[in-house]
Amino acid sequence: MRRGKLLDIQVDLRSNYVKLKIGANIDVKPGQFVMLKGDWEEPILPRPFSIYDRDNISFTVLMKIRGKATRKLSKLKIGGEIRFKGPLGNPYPEFSDRMTYLIGGGSGYAPLHFYAEHCPRKENIIFFIGVDKKDTREFFDEVKGCRYEWAVEDGSSDYKTVVDLIEDYSFPPDAVLIGCGPKVVLQTMLRIAEMNSLEAYVSLEEMMVCGVGMCKGCAVKVKEGDRISIKHVCKDGPLFSVKEVLLEW
Amino acid sequence: MVDIAVELFGLRFKNPVVLASGPSGNGKEAIEVFDLAKLGGFTTKTVTWEPRQGNPPPRLVEIYGGILNSIGLENNGIECFIKEELPLLKDVDTVKIVSVGGDTVEEFAQMVERLNDIPYVDVIELNLSCPNVENGGISFGKSPSMVRKVCETCKKMSPKKPLMAKLSSDVTDVVEIASEAIKGGIDGLTLINSVQGMRMNIETGRPYLLRGVGGMSGPCIKPIGIWNVYQVRRAFPDIPIIGTGGVMNGEDVIEYIMAGANVVGIGFGAIVDFDLPYRVIDEVKVFLKEHKYGSIRDLVSKRGDIQ
Ligand SMILES: Cc1cc2nc3c(=O)[nH]c(=O)nc-3n(C[C@H](O)[C@H](O)[C@H](O)COP(=O)(O)OP(=O)(O)OC[C@H]3O[C@@H](n4cnc5c(N)ncnc54)[C@H](O)[C@@H]3O)c2cc1C
Ligand SMILES: Cc1cc2nc3c(=O)[nH]c(=O)nc-3n(C[C@H](O)[C@H](O)[C@H](O)COP(=O)(O)O)c2cc1C
Ligand code: FES
């Protein structure tokens, strides 16, 4: 695994989110991810995180504190060592001339943020983002020039969930939808895209060890015409077209 | 200069480290990720007669000191493997071990027959120990008579190529199973496969893996691997053994060799950290040098009596 020093860490204990800025120059494109691990024996597996931001000397991840590894990562000190492999996975496709709706819940915002930052035509980007509370919304940086619609579960905005937001919205026929977040959000997107014949993509998550397609751990079922086959989130994804993906086995 | 090469079946392993079957796939990705020519050998993921989709996810969960997996031998089947996947390894300068898994004795035999004709396949490994399939796998590997039958039948199909059997530790007496494999004409043994286990999700009251049971890999199983290798070596002083299970560093390799292994397999460790196999090889060299062993053979000759 490669090594990098932690250049900066922002912990927001109200929202339970962390930004980790890691000193390593990696050639990473929006949608790709890395697998991170601190200099410890346990937990033994590196954890996958999408890239939230990058520059020539570093990359940043936006991480929700969930369990053992994220808690430990959130307690690292600046200068501390991080091991990582990546960039892994495929970049999201670009659609600069079409209205692109970036739909996300919680930490699913991370890859969408990086995607929008790299998009040459920000006026074509509309975010639909769901978070649990106002603090989270404030911790998430907005990309200048893009439009944002927020759903906040604590009631501090008009909509409570991103599912409600997108169910209420009428997407133009040539819209592209890209979603990353909880399964219910992706399922709703699938339904909306199917009903309105929209082009849509969802970013999937499965347990990963190798991150490069060798171990067959992160399998998903896809349909190509009538054929059902197996793909792997790390190597073939993480983004899949709603036309091919089957969210249930 | 220490010499870490190992000779087995008349084949030269540049060093005692091989990649174990499964975690690092069938070679397609591994040739991009690893410099396989720096390793003693590469074992391809178990291939089956028909293509297999594997088990529904979740197929993996972390445990203390490793993982549990229930992949279920996902692969494209022997035809596709021989035509499209295996040829990628043809010119790779390392010992090539191809692992096969059948639902029936006939399937094992047919696959061995097919592989027998391929000159660059150095060794064939019979997977008699996969914990994640309904037929074949461990259900064969638990039965001494089945193990003997599979080995006998396959040896007939491939009298010249070295044939190994990969055994499980989830049996009453590994020495009895090994003994039947040897009577069946097997040339070597790989010990051990992943160890059956389960992890419950205490929020849902269900096992984490959809299939329930899985196989444990990683440092948590190393003592089981060592003990199995040791018992078989004690009973059979000359049978070639690839010791596998939980190897994460050079000392683990030395430990396996001292327990009786000729060569050592790495599964989990190599896919968590792709640099780990080379580091392990370097650490083996350093150990030999520091302990004034000139070669692996030297190390083996000085290990304590296995009794
Ligand atoms: C491609 C991909 C990109 C991701 N990007 C982000 C991101 O940008 N920001 C973010 O906050 N989270 C992201 N995640 C989720 C993140 O990996 C998990 O939240 C993290 O692994 C939790 O680890 P833990 O030890 O804190 O929690 P644990 O209690 O150990 O695990 C909680 C849950 O996290 C998931 N998880 C744990 N280990 C792994 C693993 N090795 N591989 C895959 N999933 C695992 C499992 O669903 C598990 O049930 C991403 C996941 C994937 C697959
Ligand atoms: C994801 C995964 C897939 C595996 N697939 C196979 C397989 O196809 N055939 C096989 O003989 N063993 C398979 N194994 C078992 C390993 O080859 C090895 O015997 C076991 O994991 C113990 O070694 P380790 O602790 O170094 O991983 C697999 C293990 C893992 C973790
Ligand atoms: S994580 Fe190993 S195949 Fe995807």
Image (cartoon, coloured by chain):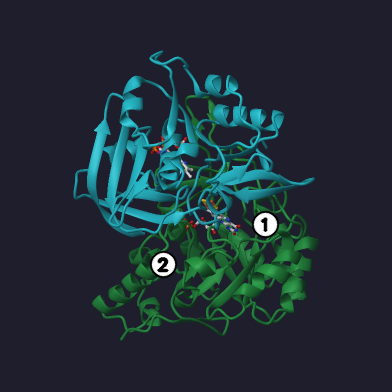
Chain colours: A cyan, B green
Disc 2 residue: CB within 8 Å of ligand 2:
no
Give me the residue at 57% from left, 57% from top. B174
Q: In this rendering, does residue B239 appear at all? A: yes
* N-term mark: 2 or 1: 1
Q: Is residue A135 above or below residue A50?
A: above
Residues under numbered marks 2 and 1 in contact, where contact means CB atoms less than 8 Å apart:
no
Circle 1 crowding by C-alpha within 10 Å: few under 14, some 14–19, many from 20: many
Q: Position of residue A94 (x, y in %)?
A: 53, 49
Q: Position of residue B242 (x, y in %)?
A: 51, 68
Q: Position of residue A96 (x, y in %)?
A: 52, 46
Q: In this rendering, does residue B186 appear at all? A: no
Of the pair A29 and B293, the residue shown nearer to us: A29
Circle 2 crowding by C-alpha within 10 Å: few under 14, some 14–19, many from 20: many
Of the pair A108 and B258, the residue shown nearer to us: A108
Disc 1 residue: CB within 8 Å of ligand 2:
yes
Q: Are marks 2 and 1 on the same chain?
A: yes
Question: Would you identify the image quadrant in which residue B48 lies?
Answer: bottom right
Q: Badge 1 is on which residue?
A: B75
Q: Secondary structure at mark 2?
A: helix
Q: Secondary structure at mark 1?
A: loop
- Report the image quarter containing ligand 2: bottom right
- The three-letter code of the residue at mark 2 reads Pro
Give me the residue at 39% from left, 36% from top. A145
Q: Badge 2 is on which residue?
A: B277
- The three-letter code of the residue at mark 1 reads Asn
Q: Is residue B203 above or below residue A9?
A: above
Where the N terminus of chain B falls, by quadrant? bottom left
Question: In this image, A118 relative to A203: left or right?
Answer: left
Of the pair A241 and A232, the residue shown nearer to us: A241
